[in-house]
Image (cartoon, grey):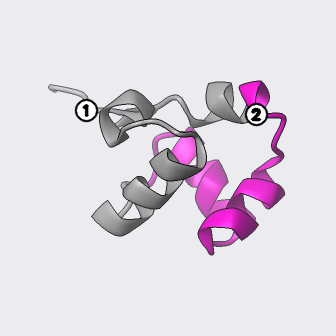
Amino acid sequence: MKTRIKELRARYDLTQEELAKKVGVRRETILFLEKGKYNPSLKLAYTIAKVFDSTIEDVFILDDE
């Protein structure tokens, strides 16, 4: 799964640490999400999308491999 988290963080001027605190996870979780090494729970995906005033589909892109 690909994400636009890094791009959105830059737009909202947020560090990984700041985003992690807003959504209640560790910074490493945000790092792994950005690198596509971790698939979030639906609740986490929704919370991250809400921080960016976006939909889950706008933040997370499903790879059809």
Span of residues in magenta:
10-38
Q: Secondary structure at mark 1?
A: loop
* Residue in front for this viewpoint, 14 or 50: 50
Question: Residue 3 location, x and y as percent?
Answer: 46, 33
The circle drawn on residue 62 is 1
Residue at x 65%, y 24% (from the top left corner): 7
* Residue in front for this viewpoint, 9 or 63: 9
Residue 25 to residue 64: above or below: below
Question: Residue 6 location, x and y as percent?
Answer: 66, 32
- For the residues labelled 1 and 2, the Cα–Cα distance comes to 23 Å
Magenta segment, prevailing SS (helix, strand or loop):
helix
Q: Is residue 28 magenta?
A: yes
Residue 1 sits in which quadrant? top left
**Is tag 1's residue or tag 2's residue first in the polypeptide sequence?**
2
The reply to whether discs 1 and 2 touch (Cβ–Cβ < 8 Å) is no
Question: Residue 10 location, x and y as percent?
Answer: 77, 28
Q: Secondary structure at mark 2?
A: loop
Q: Residue furthest front?
A: 53
Q: Say what amino acid the circle numbered 1 marks.
A: Leu
* Residue in front for this viewpoint, 3 or 18: 18
Residue at x 47%, y 46% (from the top left corner): 49
Q: Residue furthest left?
A: 64
Q: Which quadrant is home to the C terminus?
A: top left
Residue at x 63%, y 54% (from the top left corner): 30
Q: Is residue 57 left or right of residue 14?
A: left
The residue that disc 2 covers is 12
| Within-10-Å neighbours for mark 1: few <14, some 14–19, many 20+ | few
Question: Residue 62 location, x and y as percent?
Answer: 25, 32
Q: Say what amino acid the circle numbered 2 marks.
A: Tyr
